[in-house]
Image (spheres, rainbow, N blue to C red):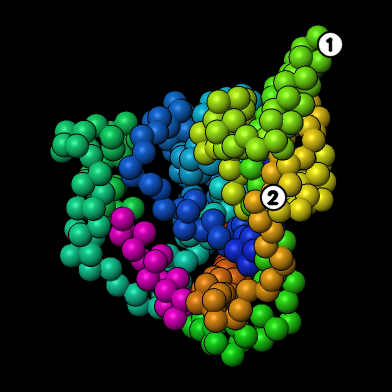
Amino acid sequence: MSPATGAGDWRTISEMKRTMRSLWAGAVLASALFPLGALAAPPEQGKENKVAAYVNGVPIMVRDVEEALSGKLPGGSMHGGVSSEKKQKYWLDAAKGLVAQELIVQAGRAAGIKVEPAEVTARLKQVRSRYPSPEAYKQAIQARGLTPASVQKRIEREILVEKAVRREVDEKVRVSEEEARRFYERNPDRFNEPENVRLRHILVRRDPAIKEGRDAARRKALDLAARIKKGADFAALARSESDDPSREQGGDLGLVHKGRLMPAVEEAAFRLKPGVVSDPVETIYGFHILKVEARVPETRRSFDSIKGKLIRDLGDLARQDRLQAWIETLSTRATIRYVDQGADSSSGPRRSGSP
């Protein structure tokens, strides 16, 4: 990333979707359906038969919670690098994800959803294809404490969860063009494209701790700016003189909008008229020379240009809401008891409604 730019960006409907989405509901499949493509350490000694929770009497094993958790934490963080409070929260989130999965499995079976052997065979073939050889696959499942039979059982549950969610959630959510248009009209600011400038940039780096280095960098930047103003080619000088990665593109930063540039650079850039070269602008990185190639005024994206994506995004939101509501309904009808880590095992079973 260029020192001139930052990470900020305008808020899109996709970002809104990620913000509004329920992390618990959204994590049901991701946390519960263990990815067989990645190796993981076998269960720690003594944890093979420990139970984390019961869902209507069905045990959720500690080893499965920790396996789900291992894919969400940075390497080694199960043993350090994460505070005990955060680790407990992550652990509980993983356990809740597995509880939610078990609720869906039980609901799917109660609804009569079937998984055919051919479906399991086809999915298992996909899993095996990720490995270079049958022996590599065998070693991978053994490293995780799995057997061919337990892998097949996991795949069967995975397909059952997918079918149950498809039946109860996906097939019952439809977002019409009219609904999408209504959202578009009620939220105009979400679909504005901010003013942009097409910007070129030369950076002369300096060492802020050395006064002589600052003075030398400033003199060089002033000289480069003067040469460009007298007719020297900006892109050519950027390639030969700039200390910024954008030199490879002749200093071209492309279209940028407010919020993406360092404050001092942004102020100077959006004050420039197209074709005008700035005087050197100083930041902690050094001295920046700017040239605005063009300005693109703020515009509003047309409904037709974003209709398809908007319908998909609103559908994703609706499915997440329905999934969460369904899991909450299943929870109120179930007997769920946490008995290990991340929960107060002395509180006894939690029961809401009838199993």
Residue 275's disc is 2
Q: Nearer the viewer, residue 155 or 336?
A: 155
Residue that numbered label 1 is attached to: 211
Q: Is residue 111 left or right of residue 18?
A: left
Which residue is found at the position 28% from the left and 37% from the top? 141
Please indicate, yes or no, whether residue 129 appears anywhere in the rendered image.
yes
Please indicate, yes or no, whether residue 340 appears anywhere in the rendered image.
no
**Numbered marks: total:** 2
Residue 258 is situated, as x and y percent measured from the top left of the image, at 75, 53
Say few, some or many: other residues with alpha carbon within 10 Å of mark 1 (under 14 / 14 to 19 / 20 or more): few
Residue 192 is situated, as x and y percent measured from the top left of the image, at 70, 69
Residue 189 is situated, as x and y percent measured from the top left of the image, at 74, 72
| Secondary structure that dominates the magenta span | helix
**Which of the two marks, 1 or 2, is nearer to us in this view?**
2
Say few, some or many: other residues with alpha carbon within 10 Å of mark 2 (under 14 / 14 to 19 / 20 or more): few
Which element is circle 1 on?
A: helix
Identify the residue at the far front of this view: 230
Q: Nearer the viewer, residue 38 or 212?
A: 212
Which element is circle 2 on?
A: loop
Which residue is found at the position 41% from the left and 53% from the top? 33
Q: Is residue 274 left or right of residue 241?
A: right
Residue 315 is situated, as x and y percent measured from the top left of the image, at 54, 75
Q: Quarter of the image containing the N terminus?
A: top right
Magenta highlight range: 155-171
Q: Amino acid at mark 1?
A: Lys
Identify the residue at the far left of this view: 134
Q: Amino acid at mark 2?
A: Gly
Residue 223 lies, with reference to residue 335, above or below; the image says above
Q: Earlier in the sequence, mark 1 or mark 2?
A: 1
